Image (cartoon, grey):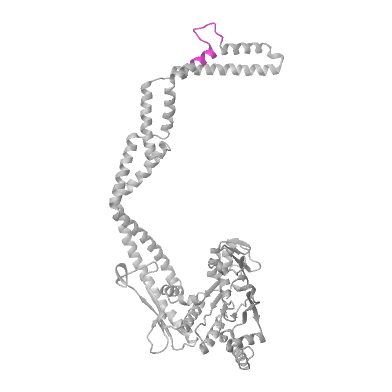
Amino acid sequence: MVWGVLEEMRIRSLGVIDDAVVELSPGFTAVTGETGAGKTMVVTSLGLLLGGRADPALVRIGAASAVVEGRISVPPGAPAAVRAEEAGAELDEGVLLVSRTVSAEGRSRAHLGGRSVPVGLLAELADELVAVHGQTDQQGLLKPARQRGALDRYAGEAVSVPLAAYGEAYRRLRAVTAELDEITTRARERAQEADLLRFGLEEVEAVAPLPGEDAELAAEAERLGHAEALASAAALAHAALAGSPEDPESVDATTLVAGAGRALEAVRSHDPALAALADRMGEISILLADVATELAGYADDLDADPLRLAAVEERRAALTQLIRKYGDGEGTAAVLAWAEERAARLGELDNDDDRIEELTAERDRLRDELSALAQRLTDARTEAADRFAAAVTAELASLAMPHARVSFSLAQTEDPEGVEVGGRRVAYGPSGADEVELLLAPHPGAPPRPIAKGASGGELSRVMLAVEVVFAGVDPVPTYLFDEVDAGVGGKAAVEIGRRLAKLARTAQVVVVTHLPQVAAFADRQLLVEKTNDGSVTRSGVTVLEGEERVRELSRMLAGQEDSETARAHAEELLAAARADG
């Protein structure tokens, strides 16, 4: 069931396209046009909508920016709809609006369902919505890593589950091996580091600083250094408040305030306002008495001991040295924090032998685990390779390659330091120990050869299409976009490709940029990308072809002449054959 359809794209100021609306059908849409008319801009536009790299060179000369907007029907509950709604996008009656803007300066902005989103989110949705295949993808299929990825995708959970566990164990093994190498190869440096840490910790332990001790000692040194001045000031203040025993005639503040209080107490009953003042005067008298008492005690307790001052300054000097060396001038708390951290580090360094033993045991365990998982991957890939090759071979028979045979070669490279697979020690990597290569025997008697060496351009196009058709049966996506998948193909093979794409369009949306009339004739809808030139500016537009216009375009594609009677007859014959086949 198709659960996502690209309904329409609008392209503005992108390459040679000034302003064009691309209307797409749910089935098979063919995009045609003369060379250089901008057909590839359709593919490029969709790539931008799906989070592709934004190249400012794509912006039409003279324009400030290029804009691509798309309408994709996505039923509620579909994976793409759920992910879009999680990002805050809104669906308009099952339609998801996507837009991408690229400025001439290279800035790029993306919007999804009316909400500004990171471009990376569009790339996430791409995996759920559209499979894009261009000529570069055909070349990508030549790479062994891509071939292994295709096989793994076809195998499904039989490979994906052990591959996930393998990947986790592989990353952990790399981390363990790196730490083990670091410990063993840097043993001398680590020993020197341990000696320095031990010396510093011994210095801190010898002084034994306390949290906040530096601030407390600074305050005490300030007090002891000015003990005589403090004592004299306290005595004078006490005499002013409480009087001096040596001068019985002196007048002190306590006596004066007490007299004022008695005067007010005598008449307080006559006026509440004066009574309130009398109460406050009483409070002042009590406060003066308390302060006078504390001043007397302060003067008695003040100790101008020069020996204690010397001891305090000596302790402060020791603490200052520690703070400068280990506390970054931040006080004894920073020194103690340094000591705690370095003690933990010293413990690690002193326990190198134990750590080496632990890491060695974990490394051996992980290698055994990787061996078991690599064997599972090899077994699953071997089983899937036979089924995948048989399915692709069957598809090639429908693409005018009836005698072609596809197979997979799974091999490993011996490595005494590797993991054990099939009773041998073999090299391994992040995806296992298997070297996967897709082989093609194009006709009977021909030995299977890697497709990178044994496939022509047309054969490679058909192999890629066959692989995608097989994927459509086991891991479908809503929309397939092929950019000149028929490159290097002609004649009967082109007809078979058109027929196979039409069959694929029964269960998915298919958009094909093509130059072959045999392929375009099988499309449910044909779009013409046409360029115009007013003498100074070249523009391209997109038109839906129907009836006579479609016959004329197919005639041009067949013979280069829209009005050739022979070409028109052939075009009508192609359309009739395609309809009959459908």
Locate residue 219: give its quadrant: top left
Residue 375 vs 211, above or below: the answer is below
| Percent x, y of residue 552 | 64, 87
- Which quarter shows the N terminus? bottom right
Q: Is residue 566 visible?
A: yes
- Seen as rendered, the residue at the extreme top is 249
User: Is 67 on the left-hand or right-hand side of 489?
Assistant: right
- Which quarter shows the C terminus? bottom right
- 361 or 208: nearer the viewer: 208
Residue in the picture at 66% in, 68% down = 93
- Seen as rendered, the residue at the extreme bottom is 566
Residue range of the region highlighted in magenta in the rendering: 235-251
Residue in the picture at 43% in, 81% down = 389
- Magenta stretch: includes residue 239: yes
| Percent x, y of residue 34 | 59, 81
Residue 283 vs 419, above or below: the answer is above
Residue 581 vs 155, above or below: the answer is below
| Percent x, y of residue 67 | 61, 67
| Percent x, y of residue 572 | 62, 90
